[in-house]
Image (cartoon, rainbow, N blue to C red):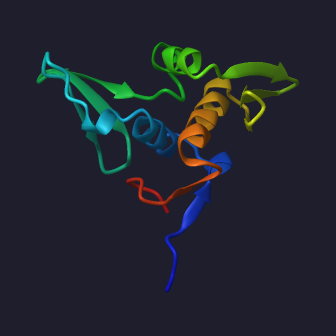
Amino acid sequence: MNSPARKSVDLLLPPELDYWVAKAEDIFFFQADDGRTYEIDAQGSIRVASTPERSYLYAPSSDWRIAGPIILRHRISLQACGDVWIADCGRRHVAIADNPLVAAMRVRVMLAFGQAVGEDAPGAG
């Protein structure tokens, strides 16, 4: 019996990384009282609709306004080291990337799912 394919979190890049952060944050099952809904498009990008006419891209790997509260809530630390950024959470989960938010969001995914994730993200593979 074949087990599902798994992918190292260290290999995740946007928008697949954003998908896994959204899954870790449980936003797929959240509908706000004011009518906001969350949708995933075929490429794996996530759009949050605040009204039927207005939506924005859910991209914590590139948007500090989204990533900042996640980083604070989970106490993810960031450190510049030469040309790369190191993110960690209690030295238990560590990620390195060229971008501080990519490193931090990889740690967020590790906190929820460990070192590897299934390949069920839209556009994954």
Can you say whether 71 is above or below 20 in the image? above
Q: Tell me if 103 is positioned left or right of 79 in this view.
A: left
Residue at 67% across / 24% down in the picture?
100
Q: Quadrant of residue 85?
A: top right
Q: Judge left or right: residue 59 versus residue 93.
A: left
Residue at 68% x, 28% y: name it: 99
Q: Residue furthest bottom?
A: 1
Q: Residue at x 73, y 29 (%)?
A: 88
Q: Nearer the viewer, residue 16 or 28?
A: 28
Q: How many marks?
A: 0
Residue found at the very far right of the displayed protein: 82
Instruction: Using the image, determine if residue 31 lies above or below residue 19.
Output: above
Tell me the residue at 54%/29% (across/down): 61
Residue 49 image position (x, y, % from top left): 21, 25
User: x, y percentage for residue 84?
Assistant: 80, 29
Return the x and y of residue 62 as percentages of the image width and height.
53, 25
Question: Front-most of 43 and 6?
Answer: 6
Describe residue 51's horizontal placement relative to residue 113 as left or right: left
